[in-house]
Image (tube, helix red, strand yellow):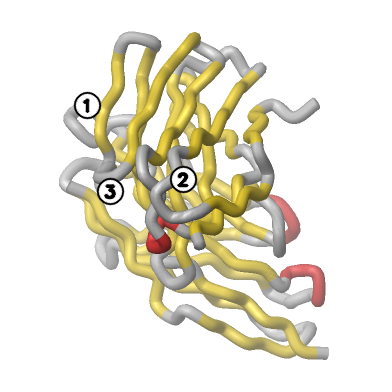
Protein backbone atom coordinates (compact mmCIF):
# COMPACT_ATOMS: atom_id res chain seq x y z
CA UNK A 1 0.00 0.00 0.00
CA UNK A 2 1.11 3.52 -0.75
CA UNK A 3 2.32 5.70 2.13
CA UNK A 4 0.10 8.59 0.99
CA UNK A 5 -3.16 7.64 -0.69
CA UNK A 6 -5.36 10.04 -2.58
CA UNK A 7 -8.90 9.31 -3.68
CA UNK A 8 -10.27 9.54 -6.26
CA UNK A 9 -7.47 9.28 -8.82
CA UNK A 10 -9.58 10.92 -11.50
CA UNK A 11 -12.81 12.88 -11.28
CA UNK A 12 -14.96 14.81 -13.70
CA UNK A 13 -17.52 17.10 -12.14
CA UNK A 14 -19.87 19.84 -13.24
CA UNK A 15 -19.60 23.54 -12.54
CA UNK A 16 -21.26 24.43 -9.26
CA UNK A 17 -20.98 21.01 -7.71
CA UNK A 18 -19.34 20.40 -4.36
CA UNK A 19 -16.53 17.90 -4.43
CA UNK A 20 -14.19 16.44 -1.85
CA UNK A 21 -10.73 15.06 -2.44
CA UNK A 22 -9.40 12.80 0.24
CA UNK A 23 -5.92 12.05 1.48
CA UNK A 24 -4.78 9.50 4.01
CA UNK A 25 -1.29 8.57 5.13
CA UNK A 26 0.43 5.74 6.95
CA UNK A 27 3.71 7.60 7.47
CA UNK A 28 2.80 8.82 10.94
CA UNK A 29 3.69 12.34 9.84
CA UNK A 30 2.20 15.30 11.67
CA UNK A 31 2.18 17.73 8.75
CA UNK A 32 -0.04 17.53 5.68
CA UNK A 33 -0.39 19.74 2.62
CA UNK A 34 -2.56 20.21 -0.45
CA UNK A 35 -1.02 21.49 -3.67
CA UNK A 36 -2.39 21.99 -7.15
CA UNK A 37 -0.32 21.59 -10.28
CA UNK A 38 -0.98 23.53 -13.46
CA UNK A 39 1.16 23.39 -16.60
CA UNK A 40 3.85 26.07 -16.51
CA UNK A 41 3.01 27.10 -12.95
CA UNK A 42 4.55 24.27 -10.98
CA UNK A 43 2.90 23.28 -7.70
CA UNK A 44 1.15 25.89 -5.62
CA UNK A 45 0.17 25.48 -2.00
CA UNK A 46 -3.56 25.56 -1.24
CA UNK A 47 -3.73 24.66 2.46
CA UNK A 48 -1.47 23.10 5.02
CA UNK A 49 -1.83 21.64 8.49
CA UNK A 50 0.96 21.18 11.02
CA UNK A 51 -1.25 19.15 13.36
CA UNK A 52 -4.91 18.24 13.78
CA UNK A 53 -5.81 21.59 15.36
CA UNK A 54 -3.68 23.70 13.04
CA UNK A 55 -5.02 24.68 9.60
CA UNK A 56 -3.43 27.40 7.49
CA UNK A 57 -4.14 28.98 4.15
CA UNK A 58 -1.57 28.71 1.42
CA UNK A 59 -1.05 31.02 -1.52
CA UNK A 60 -4.21 30.03 -3.45
CA UNK A 61 -6.87 29.07 -0.89
CA UNK A 62 -9.82 30.97 -2.38
CA UNK A 63 -12.57 28.58 -3.43
CA UNK A 64 -11.20 25.74 -1.32
CA UNK A 65 -11.65 24.48 2.21
CA UNK A 66 -10.02 21.66 4.17
CA UNK A 67 -10.68 19.37 7.07
CA UNK A 68 -8.11 17.52 9.16
CA UNK A 69 -10.21 14.70 10.52
CA UNK A 70 -7.33 12.91 12.17
CA UNK A 71 -3.57 12.99 12.08
CA UNK A 72 -3.68 10.62 9.11
CA UNK A 73 -6.50 12.26 7.12
CA UNK A 74 -6.67 15.59 5.35
CA UNK A 75 -9.50 16.39 2.93
CA UNK A 76 -9.79 19.17 0.39
CA UNK A 77 -13.21 20.48 -0.65
CA UNK A 78 -14.28 22.61 -3.54
CA UNK A 79 -17.50 24.19 -2.33
CA UNK A 80 -18.72 25.18 -5.79
CA UNK A 81 -16.42 23.92 -8.49
CA UNK A 82 -15.50 26.15 -11.41
CA UNK A 83 -13.65 25.27 -14.63
CA UNK A 84 -10.42 27.04 -13.64
CA UNK A 85 -10.11 24.61 -10.76
CA UNK A 86 -9.37 21.92 -13.32
CA UNK A 87 -5.93 20.74 -12.29
CA UNK A 88 -3.85 17.94 -10.83
CA UNK A 89 -4.07 17.96 -7.04
CA UNK A 90 -1.40 16.53 -4.77
CA UNK A 91 -1.46 15.73 -1.10
CA UNK A 92 1.87 15.61 0.73
CA UNK A 93 3.12 14.88 4.22
CA UNK A 94 6.18 15.72 6.24
CA UNK A 95 7.51 15.16 9.73
CA UNK A 96 8.80 18.01 11.89
CA UNK A 97 11.50 15.67 13.18
CA UNK A 98 12.84 15.10 9.66
CA UNK A 99 12.31 18.30 7.71
CA UNK A 100 14.15 17.19 4.59
CA UNK A 101 11.31 16.95 2.18
CA UNK A 102 7.89 15.61 1.64
CA UNK A 103 6.17 12.38 0.69
CA UNK A 104 3.66 12.92 -2.11
CA UNK A 105 0.55 11.06 -3.06
CA UNK A 106 -0.03 9.98 -6.65
CA UNK A 107 -2.36 12.88 -7.34
CA UNK A 108 -6.01 13.45 -8.22
CA UNK A 109 -6.79 14.69 -11.69
CA UNK A 110 -9.87 16.88 -11.43
CA UNK A 111 -11.78 18.17 -14.43
CA UNK A 112 -14.58 20.70 -13.97
CA UNK A 113 -16.87 20.98 -16.99
CA UNK B 1 9.59 35.11 1.73
CA UNK B 2 10.97 32.50 -0.60
CA UNK B 3 10.72 31.81 -4.29
CA UNK B 4 12.23 29.63 -6.98
CA UNK B 5 12.87 30.35 -10.63
CA UNK B 6 13.63 27.59 -13.08
CA UNK B 7 15.22 28.91 -16.25
CA UNK B 8 13.79 27.17 -19.27
CA UNK B 9 10.40 25.48 -19.26
CA UNK B 10 11.64 22.95 -21.83
CA UNK B 11 15.11 21.47 -22.26
CA UNK B 12 15.97 19.06 -25.03
CA UNK B 13 19.15 16.97 -25.15
CA UNK B 14 20.48 14.01 -27.09
CA UNK B 15 20.98 10.69 -25.41
CA UNK B 16 24.45 10.65 -23.88
CA UNK B 17 24.71 14.45 -23.67
CA UNK B 18 25.08 16.54 -20.55
CA UNK B 19 21.87 17.48 -18.76
CA UNK B 20 21.79 20.91 -17.09
CA UNK B 21 18.58 22.18 -15.50
CA UNK B 22 18.83 25.60 -13.91
CA UNK B 23 17.33 26.73 -10.63
CA UNK B 24 17.76 30.02 -8.79
CA UNK B 25 16.18 30.69 -5.42
CA UNK B 26 15.35 33.58 -3.19
CA UNK B 27 15.10 33.09 0.53
CA UNK B 28 15.29 35.44 3.49
CA UNK B 29 16.87 32.71 5.62
CA UNK B 30 19.28 29.89 4.76
CA UNK B 31 17.39 27.39 2.68
CA UNK B 32 16.91 23.73 2.24
CA UNK B 33 16.78 22.97 -1.49
CA UNK B 34 15.31 20.04 -3.35
CA UNK B 35 14.93 18.61 -6.81
CA UNK B 36 11.92 16.45 -7.58
CA UNK B 37 11.13 14.47 -10.73
CA UNK B 38 7.71 13.68 -12.11
CA UNK B 39 7.35 10.98 -14.71
CA UNK B 40 4.24 11.01 -16.91
CA UNK B 41 1.06 10.27 -14.97
CA UNK B 42 2.92 9.85 -11.72
CA UNK B 43 3.48 11.77 -8.51
CA UNK B 44 6.65 13.54 -7.44
CA UNK B 45 9.77 11.66 -6.46
CA UNK B 46 12.65 13.20 -4.56
CA UNK B 47 15.87 13.25 -6.60
CA UNK B 48 18.16 14.95 -4.13
CA UNK B 49 18.28 17.50 -1.36
CA UNK B 50 20.62 20.13 0.06
CA UNK B 51 20.43 20.45 3.83
CA UNK B 52 23.42 22.72 4.59
CA UNK B 53 26.01 19.98 4.71
CA UNK B 54 28.08 19.36 1.55
CA UNK B 55 27.44 21.86 -1.20
CA UNK B 56 27.70 19.20 -3.92
CA UNK B 57 24.80 16.84 -3.50
CA UNK B 58 24.45 13.50 -5.23
CA UNK B 59 21.05 12.00 -5.86
CA UNK B 60 19.43 9.05 -7.50
CA UNK B 61 19.79 8.01 -11.14
CA UNK B 62 23.18 9.73 -11.53
CA UNK B 63 21.95 13.27 -10.90
CA UNK B 64 23.77 15.81 -8.79
CA UNK B 65 23.38 19.45 -7.87
CA UNK B 66 25.65 22.10 -6.44
CA UNK B 67 24.54 24.74 -3.96
CA UNK B 68 26.17 28.09 -4.75
CA UNK B 69 25.25 30.66 -2.17
CA UNK B 70 26.97 33.54 -3.99
CA UNK B 71 24.90 32.83 -7.09
CA UNK B 72 21.74 31.73 -5.21
CA UNK B 73 21.67 28.75 -7.52
CA UNK B 74 21.07 25.02 -7.25
CA UNK B 75 21.45 23.68 -10.78
CA UNK B 76 20.80 20.02 -11.53
CA UNK B 77 23.22 18.09 -13.74
CA UNK B 78 23.77 14.63 -15.13
CA UNK B 79 26.84 13.83 -17.24
CA UNK B 80 25.08 11.54 -19.71
CA UNK B 81 21.37 11.64 -20.46
CA UNK B 82 19.36 8.48 -20.82
CA UNK B 83 16.04 8.08 -22.53
CA UNK B 84 14.49 7.17 -19.19
CA UNK B 85 15.38 10.64 -17.84
CA UNK B 86 12.61 12.21 -19.89
CA UNK B 87 10.30 13.76 -17.30
CA UNK B 88 9.39 17.04 -15.66
CA UNK B 89 11.75 18.33 -13.00
CA UNK B 90 10.90 20.68 -10.16
CA UNK B 91 13.22 22.68 -7.96
CA UNK B 92 11.86 23.55 -4.51
CA UNK B 93 12.97 25.59 -1.50
CA UNK B 94 12.02 25.76 2.14
CA UNK B 95 13.61 27.72 4.97
CA UNK B 96 15.76 25.84 7.47
CA UNK B 97 14.73 28.09 10.34
CA UNK B 98 11.56 29.30 11.98
CA UNK B 99 9.13 31.91 10.72
CA UNK B 100 5.89 31.95 8.80
CA UNK B 101 7.33 29.98 5.91
CA UNK B 102 8.90 27.28 8.03
CA UNK B 103 7.94 23.80 6.85
CA UNK B 104 6.45 24.97 3.57
CA UNK B 105 7.92 23.93 0.25
CA UNK B 106 7.82 26.48 -2.55
CA UNK B 107 8.19 25.05 -6.05
CA UNK B 108 9.54 26.40 -9.28
CA UNK B 109 7.52 26.30 -12.47
CA UNK B 110 9.04 23.04 -13.67
CA UNK B 111 11.29 22.08 -16.57
CA UNK B 112 10.28 19.40 -19.04
CA UNK B 113 13.29 17.39 -20.15
CA UNK B 114 13.13 15.68 -23.53
CA UNK B 115 15.82 13.18 -24.51
CA UNK B 116 16.33 12.43 -28.20
CA UNK B 117 17.86 9.19 -29.47
Q: Residues within 10 Å of mark 3 (few under 14, many from 20)?
A: few
The image position of residue B83, as x and y in percent, is 81, 76
Q: In this view, does B53 lie to the left or right of A23?
A: left
Question: Which residue, given by chain and number where applicable, does mark 2 sit on?
Answer: B50
Would residue B91 be seen by someone viewing this image from the given angle? no
Would residue B109 be seen by someone viewing this image from the given angle? yes
**How much space separates mark 2 and mark 3, taking CA atoms?**
27 Å
Question: Which residue, given by chain and number where applicable, does mark 3 sit on?
Answer: A60
Q: Residues within 10 Å of mark 2 (few under 14, many from 20)?
A: many
Q: In this view, does A60 lie above or below B114?
A: above
Of labels 2 and 1, earlier in sequence is 2
Determine whether the residue tagged by mark 1 lies in a helix, strand or loop. loop
Determine whether the residue tagged by mark 2 lies in a helix, strand or loop. strand
Report the disc number at residue B72.
none
The image position of residue A38, as x and y in percent, is 46, 63
Question: Which residue, given by chain and number where applicable, does mark 1 sit on?
Answer: B98
Amino acid sequence: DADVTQTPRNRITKTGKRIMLECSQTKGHDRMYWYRQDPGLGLRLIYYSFDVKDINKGEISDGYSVSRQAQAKFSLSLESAIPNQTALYFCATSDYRAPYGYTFGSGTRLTVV
Amino acid sequence: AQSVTQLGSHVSVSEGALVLLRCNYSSSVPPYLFWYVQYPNQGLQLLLKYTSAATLVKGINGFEAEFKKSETSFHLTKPSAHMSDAAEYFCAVRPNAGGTSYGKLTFGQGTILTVHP
